Amino acid sequence: MNKKKLIIGIVGVLVVAGGIWLFTGKTSKGGIRLETAKVGRSSISNTVTATGTVEPVTEVEVGTQVSGIIDKLYADYNDVVKAGQLIAEMDKVNLKAELASAEAQLASSKSEYEYQQKNYARNKILFEKKLISDSDYETSTYNYEKAKAAYEQNQASMVKVKRNLEYATITSPIDGVVINRAVEEGQTVAAGFETPTLFTIAADLTKMQVIADVDEADIGNVENGQRVSFTVDAYPNDVFEGTVMQIRLGDSESSSSTSSTSTVVTYEVVISADNPDLKLKPRLTANVTIFTLERDNVLTVPTKALRFVPDTQILTQLGYVVSESNTETSAGKRLVWIKNGQELKPRTVTVGSTSGNMIEITDGLNEGEELAVDLEASSMAPVAGAETERSPFMPGPPGSKKKN
C-alpha cells in the first residue's frame, strides 16, 4: 500500500514539473534554465538630451547713434510694427540748431570758394601773359585751394548733421513684434562707445528656435536634419517638435558658442520649431531630446544573444544537442545560436544599429526564429507536494501528526 502511494506521488511531481516547463517555455536542470527569445520586428531609437533656451529666429536691437532726450515713444511691449514705422523720436532742438549753423557755414564757405575761384582764374591768365609776379599767382592759387577745401569740408559736415537729425527719428527696421522696450519718455541716452538699445523687435514669433547646450560626449552623434522633441515648464503636458538646423563649432565674437565650465564643455545646437499658436515665448527654458537614431520596423534581437556562448555540458544535461560548436565568424559578422527543438545550431549574422538592450539584424535571420539568449539560474518555487529538508528540531506545521 505504501509502495503504491509512493508511485502516485512521484507521478504527480513529474506532472507538475512538466506543466511548469510547458508554461515557462524554459528547460531547467539543477537550478539552471535556458532563456530564449524570438526574432521580431520593432522600432529602435537613440537620443541625446540637453537643456536650451527658446529664442526668436530673427531678433533686432533698435538703438540710436545720437545722444539726447527721448521725446516721444510710439511703440510698447507686444506691439506689432512694420518696417519703416515710427516708433520713437528724440528731442531735435539742438540737432536743428546744429543744422542751421552748418548751413550758414556752408553758404559762407561757398561764397569764399566762388570768389577765390574767379580770382585764381583771372590771375592765371595774367600770369601766363607775364603781367603779374610769381608771388601773386602763388598766393591766389593758395587761397583758391584753401577755399575749395573749406567748402568741401562744410559739405561733408552738412551731410553728417542732416544724418544725425534723421537718426533722431527712430523707425522699425523690420516687420515684427516689440518684445522689449528699454527706455521711457524724457530719459536721456548717451551714444558713446556703443549704441544704446531702445527696443528689441522679433521678426516672426510663429517661427522660433531653441539654442540647446549639448555635452561634448554627445555632440558627435548630432547632425543637421535630426528630429527633436522638447518641453517647456510653462506647458508641461505639451510636446513640441523641431529639427536640428545648425551645430555651432565656435564664435570668437561676443559670447563664445563653445563654453567651458570647470571640465564640462558644451556646444550650441540650433533647433528650428514652428509656433503657430504662439505658446512658445522668448527666453523659455526647453528640455530637449534629439533623436540621433530612428529605425522603424526592423529585425531586432536582444544584444545579449550575441554574447551567448553555449556550455555544452550544462546544455546536454538540460536535454539539448549543441551542433557545430567550433564555428568561427568572419570579419564584420557576429554569431548567434538558433534553437530548433532540442538542437542549438550557430549562425553568422550582420548587425546594424544598437538601441538600449536591442540590436538590429540586417542579414542572417528571419522573423520568428528562436535564439538562445542566456543560461540563467532557475527561480522556480518548490513543486507542490514535494518534501523539503527541515530541521528535526523545528515543530511541524499545524495539524500535522507523527505517524509510526
Image (cartoon, rainbow, N blue to C red):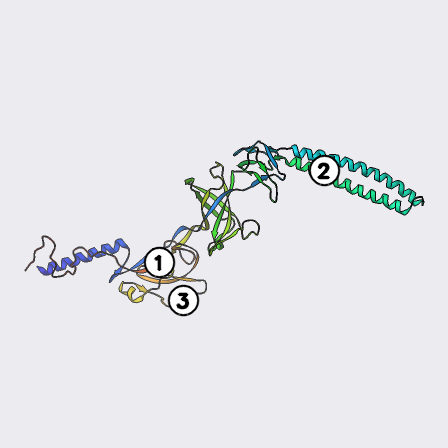
**Of the image marks 3 and 1, the number of the one nearer the N terminus:** 3
* Residue at (87% x, 41% y) in the render: 121
Quarter of the image for the C terminus: give it: bottom left
Task: State the residue position of label 1.
Answer: 371
Give me the C-alpha separation between circle 3 and circle 1. Answer: 18 Å
* Amino acid on which the number 2 mark rests in the picture: Met
Circle 3 sits in a helix, a strand or a loop, which is it?
Answer: loop
Would residue 398 be found to the left or right of residue 298 on screen?
left
In the rendered view, tell whether residue 352 sits above or below residue 171: below
* Amino acid on which the number 3 mark rests in the picture: Glu
Circle 1 sits in a helix, a strand or a loop, which is it?
Answer: strand
Quarter of the image for the N terminus: give it: bottom left
Give me the C-alpha separation between circle 2 and circle 3. Answer: 89 Å
Give me the C-alpha separation between circle 1 and circle 2. Answer: 88 Å
How many residues crowd mark 1 within 10 Å: few (<14), some (14–19), many (20+)?
many
**Of the image marks 1 and 2, the number of the one nearer the N terminus:** 2
Of tags 2 and 3, which is closer to the observer?
A: 2
**Of the image marks 2 and 3, the number of the one nearer the N terminus:** 2
Between residues 156 and 75, which one lies in front from this camera angle? 156
Would residue 129 be found to the left or right of residue 283 on screen?
right
Residue 328 — which label? 3
Task: State the residue position of label 2.
Answer: 158
In the rendered view, tell whether residue 308 sits above or below residue 207: below
Residue 85: x %, y % from top left: 60, 33
* Residue at (34% x, 59% y) in the render: 373
Residue 83 visible (yes or no): no
Q: Quadrant of residue 16?
A: bottom left
